[in-house]
Image (cartoon, helix red, strand yellow):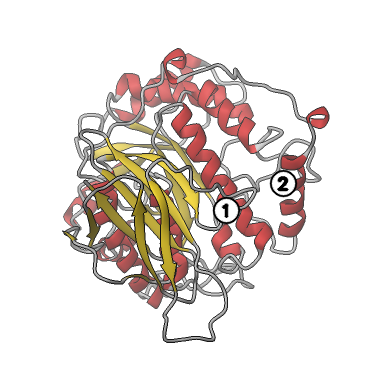
């Protein structure tokens, strides 16, 4: 079980504590424990570079016995496998892999560089030259005290398996901090400190974290929990951009607890599309195989059968891969919301004058105003731009169009085929889904 999981009854207190920490005045501000002037160049960071036609998409919580169902669900990468399982995975049709390495018996709080060096050298020996191996799983959700040792792991992987990734996944902000009633999981005062220290002490090739608050918040109806999802998404994007690192998001594809409602198409779509709109460079889903306790309604049932969730996930995976490969050619330039708040930024006015939104006109008694998340992108080469709109309504489709600040030709991308066409009179966005526009 992922160790940041907490009972739903405990979450409100954690949400309130997190909010209080964010609103504390300067006199109560926690100490700065990282170099605020550090940059990617000063740290000597070497970001992960993947082929432009490849978008990392993978499940958590599956194994070699689930290879066929993972492949059928549209994942280009299976869950983390041991080296001995690679032949079976290749036979199942996979061509990209993360190999389990772990940290062995090494004490990460008192690690010796030569010990880690020798461990990594041995672990990568059989796969370092395999072009289909993307990298090696090191650890999930480490506390900050382990960052120096993890920096040694990153350096050793780069040394003995050049071009491969040292895979480390981080806590979300609702893991406990210093001063919490529970033992500190992040071992920092804030989520920002946690991310900053990780970059500066471990010198990673990318950032990766998980956040299941869309599920915990019951489709964002609990505002405190919904805010945590948005804060984390925006903060990890900020830190990744500051240090010129790619970043990946891990989201939920099952009922998190016995009290949770089952996943639905809109919930799963919103997690994928908001990640893409914020500029995420990879996506993971937790978890593929339903465990016997606490969780439910996963893509694969406890008895090993495909479920409705598997069908939903396959559809979302197809769209994610299509759009993710297109967005690989762009850089995230801005994120804003049609209904901004103190947390959610407003239109910066760099590309769009605004967006035009409406619900179905024929239904006159629907209350409320349509709300979308907007991701703006600029091409890495050339002058093309892109805009992704995400419908934040879980129950109603919305029509959408763009108001450009400067004249341009707009095309809409088919999320299944990747082909582009001129906008129709009314372009609909399904609940929780997104729509990608290309602008020349």
User: Quarter-wise, where is residue 220 in the image?
Assistant: bottom right
CB-based contact (under 8 Å), mark 2 and mark 1:
no
Q: Is residue 314 above or below residue 226?
A: below
Q: How many marks?
A: 2
In the displayed structure, 196 sits above or below 224; it is above
- Residue nearer the viewer, 204 or 167: 204
Task: Give the distance between the C-alpha atoms of the residues marked 2 and 1, in whole angstroms.
Answer: 20 Å
**Mark 2 or 1 closer to N-term?**
2
Image quarter of residue 73: bottom left
Residue behind mark 1? 340
Q: Position of residue 66 (x, y in %)?
A: 33, 62
Q: Secondary structure at mark 2?
A: helix
Q: Is residue 327 left or right of residue 233?
A: left
Which numbered circle lies on residue 18? 2
> Residue 422: x and y, percent?
19, 62
Residue mark closest to the camera, 2 vs 1: 1
- Between 413 and 134, the residue placed more toward the observer is 413
Position in image of residue 117 (x %, y %):
42, 19
Task: Please say whether residue 209 is visible from this viewpoint.
Answer: yes
Residue lying at 42% horizontally and 81% vertically, measured from the top left: 361
- Say which quadrant the N terminus sits in: bottom right
């Amino acid at each position: 079980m992922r160790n940041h999981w907490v009972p739903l009854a405990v979450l409100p207190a954690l949400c309130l504590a997190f909010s209080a920490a964010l609103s504390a005045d300067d006199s109560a501000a926690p100490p700065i424990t990282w170099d605020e002037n550090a940059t990617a160049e000063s740290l000597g960071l070497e970001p992960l570079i993947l082929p432009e036609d490849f978008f990392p998409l993978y499940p958590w919580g599956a194994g070699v016995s689930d290879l066929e169902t993972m492949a059928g669900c549209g994942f280009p990468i299976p869950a983390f496998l041991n080296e001995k399982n690679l032949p079976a995975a290749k036979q199942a049709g996979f061509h990209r892999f993360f190999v389990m390495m772990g940290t062995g018996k090494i004490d990460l709080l008192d690690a010796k560089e030569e010990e880690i060096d020798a461990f990594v050298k041995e672990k990568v020996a059989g796969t370092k030259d395999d072009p289909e191996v993307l990298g090696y799983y090191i650890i999930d959700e480490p506390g900050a005290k382990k960052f120096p040792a993890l920096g040694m792991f990153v350096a050793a992987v780069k040394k003995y398996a050049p071009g491969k990734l040292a895979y480390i996944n981080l806590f979300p902000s609702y893991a406990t901090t210093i001063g919490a009633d529970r033992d500190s999981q992040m071992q920092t005062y804030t989520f920002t400190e946690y991310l900053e220290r990780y970059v500066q002490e471990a010198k990673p090739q990318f950032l990766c974290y998980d956040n299941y608050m869309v599920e915990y918040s019951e489709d964002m109806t609990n505002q405190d929990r919904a805010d945590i999802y948005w804060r984390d998404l925006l903060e990890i994007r900020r830190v990744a951009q500051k240090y010129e690192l790619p970043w990946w998001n891990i989201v939920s594809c099952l009922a998190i607890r016995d009290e949770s409602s089952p996943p639905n198409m809109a919930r799963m779509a919103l997690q994928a599309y908001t990640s893409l709109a914020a500029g995420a460079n990879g996506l993971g889903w937790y978890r593929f195989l339903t465990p016997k306790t606490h969780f439910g309604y996963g893509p694969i049932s406890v008895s090993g059968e495909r479920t409705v969730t598997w069908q939903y996930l396959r559809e979302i995976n197809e769209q994610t891969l299509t759009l993710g490969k297109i967005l690989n050619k762009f850089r995230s330039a801005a994120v804003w919301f049609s209904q901004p708040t103190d947390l959610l930024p407003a239109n910066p006015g760099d590309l769009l004058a605004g967006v035009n939104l409406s619900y179905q006109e024929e239904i006159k008694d629907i209350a409320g105003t349509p709300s979308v998340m907007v991701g703006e992108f600029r091409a890495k080469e050339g002058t093309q731009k892109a805009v992704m709109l995400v419908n934040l309504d879980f129950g109603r489709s919305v029509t959408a169009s763009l108001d450009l600040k400067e004249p341009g030709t707009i095309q809409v991308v088919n999320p299944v085929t990747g082909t582009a066409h001129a906008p129709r009179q009314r372009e609909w966005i399904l609940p929780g889904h997104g729509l990608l526009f290309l602008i020349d």
